[in-house]
Every structure is written in C-alpha cells, then in structure tokens.
Image (cartoon, grey):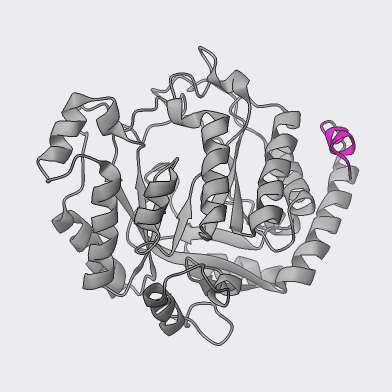
Amino acid sequence: MSKKEWLTLEKINDEVIQQLCDEAGKVRDTHWGKNITYSRKVFLPLTNMCRDECGYCTFVEHPDSPRANIMSLNDVSDTLRRGEQLDCKEALFSLGEKPEQRYGKAASMLGKLGYSRMVDYLRDACEFTLKETRLIPHVNCGTLNESEIRLLKPVAASMGMMLESLSLDLMKKGSAHHRCPDKTPKLRMQTLELTGKHQVPFTTGLLIGIGETWADRIQALQAINRIHLQYGHIQEVIIQNFRAKPGTLMANHSEPDLHEMVKTLAVARLILDPSISIQAPPNLHERHAVYIQSGINDWGGISPVTQDFINPECAWPDLQKLSQSTAEHGYQLRERLTVYPSYLRRAGYVSPALGQRLIARSDESGLARVSSF
C-alpha cells in the first residue's frame, strides 16, 4: 500500500481492524512460525541521569536529587550474579543520554569512577560482564556517533534506541520532547543509519500516544523500513504504549487505548519487512491474546531479577502464566538470545568472541537453550 492508503486507516471500525489483524497474523505465521519469543535478562540502569527532559519520564533524576546514581562495578556485578543464578542470558544496559555533557555534577560523579565520558564507562562495564559472567551485553544508550559504535560493538552483541517518533512538533515547548537534544529526528535517524553501516543487530521502535499523529506513525514505520531494506540490521521493532505517570509534564495526558495499540501493531507488521520482529511489552497491557492476534512474534525482555526501571509500576508477567496464555492461542513461548537467530549466521554482525558465546548459549535453531522458569 502507498503512504496515502495507509493514512486512510486513521479512523476505521472494528471490522476493518480485524481484517488488518488477520493479514498481519498471516505474515507473522509465514515468516516466524508458531513461536513467540522473549529474552530472559537482567536490567542494569548504569545511570539514571540524562541531559534530556522527556515529558513522560520518571526514570531520570536530576544530578541534584539524592536518587541520582551511577552504578558502581560492584553493583553491576551483584545484579549480574543474581541473573546468572536464575539462568538469564542477556545483560541489558540502559542509561540516560550523556548527562556529563550538561551537568557538572554528573561529570564529577563520573570522574570519581575514573571516566570523563559515560560511553567509556559503559564499554568497560560490558567488558566486565563478558569477563566475569556468561551473560551477553545489549546496550540502550540513545544516540551514537560512528566512533561510539566502533567502541561498543566488540563488547555488545546488540544495541538499541527507540526512534519513538519523527515529529518535529514534539520538540516544541510543552510537548513530549521539548528540551531533549537527543530526540531530534535527524540524530535518531543518523544513529539508525550508522549502526546499519557497521552491521549492528539493532532494536528500535515507536512510543505511541505522546502527541504524535497517525501520519507520524506511518512516517516513522516507513523510515525504519527504508533503513532496514538498505542495511538489513533492524532485528526488532517495539510498539510501546505511553503510560501517564504522576509528577511528569504528561501526568494528565490520555493514554492510547487498546484500539490504537492493536491498529498500530497490525499496520507495523504489514509495513515492515517480514524479517523484522514485532514486539509489544507484555507488562504495559494485560490483553496478551489481542496482541498475539495483532501479529506480534515477541514479548521482549522479561526479568526474574530486576524490575522494569522505565515503567516500575508495571510488573513483569509470570512466565508460566505467559507461556500458558500463549499456548492457549496456538503458539509456543520460546526463549531467545539478544541476537536473533538469523544474525548469528551472518558474517560481520557479531565479533568472533561474542559469536562463540552466543552459539554456546543457543540451540540448533539459534534460540536460547531450554531453561526452566
């Protein structure tokens, strides 16, 4: 369909949505079969400081706050060890973007650890993970330039950054991305392109309900797809629903309803190349069956150790119950690694050392070796 045709789907009834879901389900089944995957991981918020001021975020703390933090390697080690004990495979490092470039206090806190740039500390934390544990690092650290990608690739099997939206209107005063230099659409797209050039298995996605239009969602999905068709590195796209949080600029902003989420998921599956995994966070909505019917094939990261630090009010689903509900709708819940199976077999996407570790932790299909919940 053309962009104009996709735009006509902004206001449609339940019957048309069901038709979209049926088509999306067929695409999912043809390419991904009857498995719906998840990644068993630990979440490591390396720092909760950030130079951006997103209007919906409760993760970030100002450096003057007593809750502002940079994890020490001892803290990192403790979380990793607990993850290993519960058979986690992935260590997801999430952190605010470059707080040291905006706040002298953040730079001072980082300096006490012996670093002037957060990205260098992140690199060493990933290397520490590889030396001390069997876990495999994935990094979510926002926008990256070429030298930063080169720095991280040898120690991070995969990387991620939510595109969220390409709407410049969201940068205006009073909007979700005002005073967020790293949320500039040009910089986000540049990161997608550079990680493609450097063959990084990459995760991106949309955050829906933050003030964007339906046309903005279509634009973002098509932009992601163009980048993937050029470079082939987008392994998964997350469609995440905005959740209003007390104490934020958008505390009273309405959340997207299930209708909007289902429509966006189905259209994402139909716009994006079938090789791109479609993920929906299972802890931000309990209608798992509807998500499955919309064409998803992945639940994303679920941790038996750490909370969702971005949405701490939303607990992870119980894996046994998620497995049962997935099976009730004709699919098998399977654990995957941070790198999807197709990238394990493609030259240049992971370093030899990381490749050996991934293969050692995967079965013959490229998914994770079976573990008990």
Q: Quick one: quadrant of the C terminus?
A: bottom left
Residue 5 is one of the magenta-drawn residues: yes
Taking the view exactly as shown, the residue that stands out farthest to the bottom is 364
Residue placed at 16% from the left, 51% from the top? 72
Q: Is residue 302 left or right of residue 227?
A: left
Work out whether residue 352 can be spotted: yes
Q: Which residues are magenta?
A: 2-10
Residue placed at 70% from the left, 49% from the top? 225
Q: Quick one: quadrant of the N terminus?
A: top right
Please state which of residues 21 and 92 is positioned toward the viewer in this rendering.
92
Q: Is residue 238 left or right of residue 124?
A: right
Work out whether residue 282 can be spotted: no
Taking the view exactly as shown, the residue that stands out farthest to the left is 112
Residue placed at 70% from the left, 74% from the top? 34
Q: Position of residue 302 (x, y in %)?
A: 45, 60
Q: Quadrant of residue 95?
A: top left
Q: Relative to 308, is 187 above or below?
A: above
Q: Relative to 242, is 254 above or below?
A: above
Q: How many marks?
A: 0
Residue 286 is one of the magenta-drawn residues: no
Q: Position of residue 352 (x, y in %)?
A: 41, 76
Please state which of residues 148 and 64 is positioned toward the viewer in this rendering.
148
Taking the view exactly as shown, the residue that stands out farthest to the top is 173
Q: Is residue 288 left or right of residue 118?
A: right
Residue placed at 26% from the left, 26% from the top? 62
Q: Position of residue 365 (x, y in %)?
A: 59, 83
Q: Position of residue 370 (x, y in %)?
A: 48, 82
Q: Quadrant of residue 263?
A: top right
